[in-house]
Amino acid sequence: MIQSGSTALVDRYRELEGLKNARKLDVVLMATVSSFGALEKPSDAERRRFVELFPPVYEASTPEARRQAVAALSGHPHVPQEICRYIGAQDIAIAAPFLARSPAMSDETLTTLIETMGEEHVRAIIHRADLSQKVIQALIGCHRPQHSEIPQGNFEVRDGSRDESEILRQTLKAMAAKAGSEAEDRLGLSTLTELQTALLVRFARRGERALFLETFARALGGDRVLATDILSETSGRRLGIALIALGMTKDDTSYVLPRIAPAIANEK
């Protein structure tokens, strides 16, 4: 007779007691995940048992078993939020597929992980296909320190004041005339973080211009007027210069421009 998911979970819990062999614990971990995954709609009691059992078995198992278990859970829609947070906080080599794909993670769980975990975890979340507006806003507002907190150079864009924005305008004009694209030509402008770059690429790919504008404006020191002005130029030339000035790579810039400024895509 085939055991029900609930009975199997209880049996796995009993098997855990007294087990010391790592291979046996790997088997218990995968059996536990398999049993829970077979439940179409776990009851509250079954979810509580899984919350109690999964962490200790996971901790006692080998890295390969952990990866397999997390990958298996990545497609399950009923993983409890306690386990979602637990898995989301694991090493990125294991947590990445869960962060990027799990349909079980609530907005609150994703927001908590964005606020508490490192850049690699946040970048994995950016790759999710189903981000809500709440999570997107948390991503846009996420700040991670650069290698150098204050860029070195002639000036910086700090608070988006009109005076600093005018300096930025003049710098962009000078860069356009010079057609400079190397890092030493950037004159100490604020630099895109990797997270901002990932968001700009995502929003460009999905055609989400409003979210692209908001992220771009933050990269320009919070100056939405300047960002709107740059994006309104249909040829995309000013946007390209600004992205290069902010430190975006040639490949990412080449990807973003034709999606945000369609006129570029039509150029021969």
Image: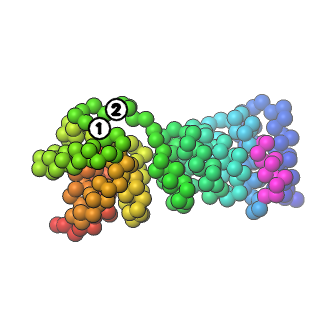
Q: Is residue 148 left or right of residue 45?
A: left
| Image quarter in which the N terminus is found | bottom right
Look at 75% across and 31% down and name the residue there: 21
Above or below residue 45? Residue 115 is: above
Relative to residue 153, is residue 84 drawn left or right?
right
* Spot occupied by residue 234 in the image (x, y as percentages of width and height): 24, 66
**Mark with earlier residue (1, 2):** 2
Q: Residues within 10 Å of mark 1 (few under 14, many from 20)?
A: many
Which amino acid does the dot numbered 2 rest on? Answer: Ile
Residue that badge 1 annotates: 156
- Dot 2: what SS? loop
Question: Where is residue 250 drawn, in percent x and y?
Answer: 26, 49
Location of residue 18 with respect to 124 vertically, above or below: above
Instruction: Give the image quarter of residue 181.
Output: top left
Part of the protein shown in magenta: 42-53
Residue at 46% across, 41% down: 143
| Label annotation for residue 150 | 2
Q: Are marks 1 and 2 in contact (CB under 8 Å)?
A: yes
Q: Quadrant of residue 64?
A: top right
* Residue shown at 61% from the left, 40% from the top: 89
Relative to 24, 173 lies left or right: left
For residue 84, side relative to residue 255 (left or right): right
- The residue located at (82%, 55%) in the rendering is 44
Considering the image in quadrants, where does the C terminus appear?
Answer: bottom left
Crowd tier of the residue under label 2, counting other residues whose Cα lies within 10 Å: few below 14, some 14–19, many 20 or above: some
